[in-house]
Image (spheres, rainbow, N blue to C red):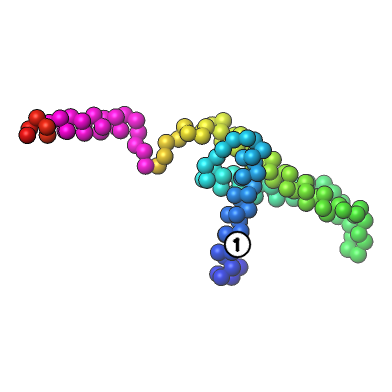
Amino acid sequence: MDVLTLPFYLGFGAIAALVVGLAAQRLLGIRLGPVRLLLTGLFALSVGPLIMLGMMGQFDIPQEGTDTRPEGAVFWFLLLAVVVTILASMAFIVVVEAFAPLGSIPPAGAGPGPVSAWSSALRRVWAMARQLGG
């Protein structure tokens, strides 16, 4: 892989991951944040082809020069690949939502509850002390 083509591969991969994540989100009828969408798509794009390779092992591959595939077999196999990839992303969303529902993990900038409550109480006491002091 050339250094100049790496950004194109990464950009196309990110766009494809977001599209797969958006499709799964839409089919499940829930809303996800951008990080979960990207993780869902990346999971599906990494697991979907592996599932398809496993399924391809079940079919006989014809000898070279003899093509015994029926008409349209490639189309149906590609359609099956897309469906399996989206189903993998939907399964990933269900598992992630079961263990960490949306909104249960606080944002990165938010502190823990007791520390945050303690710091706001300390600010109120400090403001009252300044008012009393003059």
Q: Is residue 118 visible?
A: yes
Judged from this view, the residue extending furthest toward the left is: 134
**Going 48% across and 34% down the picture, which residue do you hit?**
103
Picture layout, residue 10 above or below residue 112: below
From the top left corner, tell me how far across and down residue 54 is, in percent. 75, 47
Q: Amino acid at mark 1?
A: Tyr
Picture layout, residue 117 above or below residue 93: above
Q: Nearer the viewer, residue 37 or 59?
A: 37
Q: Secondary structure at mark 1?
A: helix
Q: Nearer the viewer, residue 108 or 27?
A: 27
**Going 26% across and 32% down the picture, which residue do you hit?**
120
**Span colored in magenta:** 109-129
- Name the side, left or right, on which 25 lies relative to 121: right
For residue 8, which quarter of the picture?
A: bottom right
- Quadrant where the N terminus is found in the figure: bottom right
Q: Residues within 10 Å of mark 1 (few under 14, many from 20)?
A: few
Is residue 119 rendered magenta in the image? Answer: yes
- Name the side, left or right, on which 103 lies relative to 55: left
- Name the side, left or right, on which 39 lies relative to 84: left
From the top left corner, tell me how far across and down residue 45 is, in percent. 65, 50
- Quadrant where the C terminus is found in the figure: top left
Q: Which residue is mark 1?
A: 9
**Going 56% across and 33% down the picture, which residue do you hit?**
97
- Name the side, left or right, on which 53 lies relative to 24: right
From the top left corner, tell me how far across and down residue 111 is, in percent. 34, 37
